[in-house]
Image (spheres, rainbow, N blue to C red):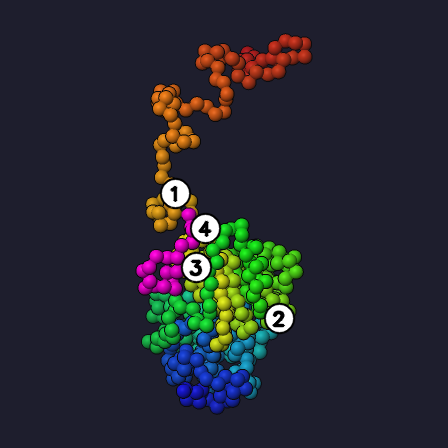
Amino acid sequence: MTTFEDLGIPAPILAAIKKVGFTTPTPIQAQAIPLALQGRDVLGSAQTGTGKTAAFGIPMIARLIAEPRSTGIIMTPTRELAAQVLSTLHPLLAGQHGIRTALLIGGEPMPRQYQQLRQNPRIIVGTPGRINDHLERRSLNLANAHFLVLDETDRMLDMGFGIQIDRILQYMPKQRQTLLFSATIPPEIEKLAQKYQNKPERISIGAMNVPIANVTQELLRVSEGDKYPQLLAQLQARGGSIIVFVKTKHGAKRLAEKLSRENLKADTIHGNLNQNKRDRVIQGFRAKRFRILVATDVAARGLDIPHIEHVINYDLPQCAEDYIHRIGRTARAGATGTAVAFITPSDGRLWHAIHKLLNPGDKSPMPRTNDRPQNRRGRGSQFGGARPFSRERKFGGERAAPAEQERRRFEGPRSKSRKFDPPRAERANTPRYQSKPRPDGSPGFSRQDQRRRHKA
């Protein structure tokens, strides 16, 4: 069995690892740490919750100890993940008083971050947007940043951070060590690796489209109107901490308020909350001050709370890969957990994409979801396409009698707006828009008559 001593980690970091309580390296740590300690670039992928943070954090700290003038920078897609990475690194820095850290994320006051940067931090963790802000304000200097980590790179590209990452790397030395870690490695990241890495070592631990084995997945087919009652039933039947994922910020806030009115201890986290509020919510959930956390996909990555026992997908994610990250919030560090997915009749397309991701080689029919979306022409009966146009139903109702069909052929459909149509000659002599009679009893004038009088 491989131990941390076998990986060539410096003694000061080994002492910190023992204090943290790590005993055996995870597969991604056992493969990535020796390569990174040799100065190699690494392109690593592993399932969520398998210890990627320590896999790049330990080599970074080792290099900063060996090179007192160097600094390291870690970029993440979300504020929560950045804060989580930094909290994981702090115990590993025990005894390293010369290595200060800075957290550069949006939603926090700039003066606090200015104060951190004035202390010359050697480990900088942040999101691309706020890091770019400091570079433009010249409050951040990356001239000695010889160690770069891009964490959850696929998510950063999905969120449109590619241009900002390019700008940040222009401020860094070209001779540097670059580590890219993610749960999935799509072709876009492989192109990015060719652009910014030097002959990287490719590490892949497990299948990227397979959730952690300790997660028990359950499907619940419900109607749209029955989702909330079913959610209440699931919450009452399950114990322990639960995350409920929804699609929108407004939906998360509204659902948390409804659950609170049911005397259920619940709170919410979404993108509209400022960073202080987000931190308070996460701290409260971690301290078990409430049992249910209603969240958008802002919490799908980076939220590492060991006591989460259940994940409920109240709304399916718009991106199939996010399903794996969502259910990866449970069964952390070898524990077991349950993931429930609500599937409504309108979720057929989303569930089809998730099913294909989880079962790439499975050619058996997809589990039925009673999905019949409307107006999907050309999709075929597999997707419940729209009913083809029927000429005999053009005028509504069932098929008309032969006599009625003969009449329609020559006269056209009867008007539904008027019960009686006066003869054409009679309509021609009727003034349009006749005004009301005058008080003296004389008839009023039509608008046509009024226009003629006005012109005269």
In this rendering, which labeled residue sits more in front, label 2 or label 3? Answer: 2
Q: Magenta residues: mostly which secondary structure?
A: loop
Spatial CA span between label 1 and label 4: 14 Å
From the image, which quarter does the C terminus lie in?
top right
Question: In x, y percent, where is residue 222?
Answer: 49, 54
Q: CA distance from mark 2 to mark 1?
A: 48 Å
Q: Which mark is residue 288?
A: 2
Kind of residue sitting beneath label 4? Ser
Question: Are the two marked residues, 2 and 1, in contact with CB atoms closer than 8 angstroms?
Answer: no
Q: Which residue range is magenta in the image?
A: 355-372
Q: Nearer the viewer, residue 276 or 107?
A: 276
Query: Where is residue 338 shown, x and y percent of the image?
Result: 50, 67
Q: What element does badge 3 sit on?
A: loop
Kind of residue at badge 3:
Cys
Residue 302 part of the magenta-drawn span? no
**What residue is disc 3 on?**
319
Q: Separation of disc 2 and disc 4 at Cα?
A: 35 Å
Instruction: Tell me the distance, in whole angstroms, between the alpha carbons under discs 3 and 1.
Output: 25 Å
The residue at which mark 4 appears reads as 346
- Disc sitting over residue 386 in the figure: 1
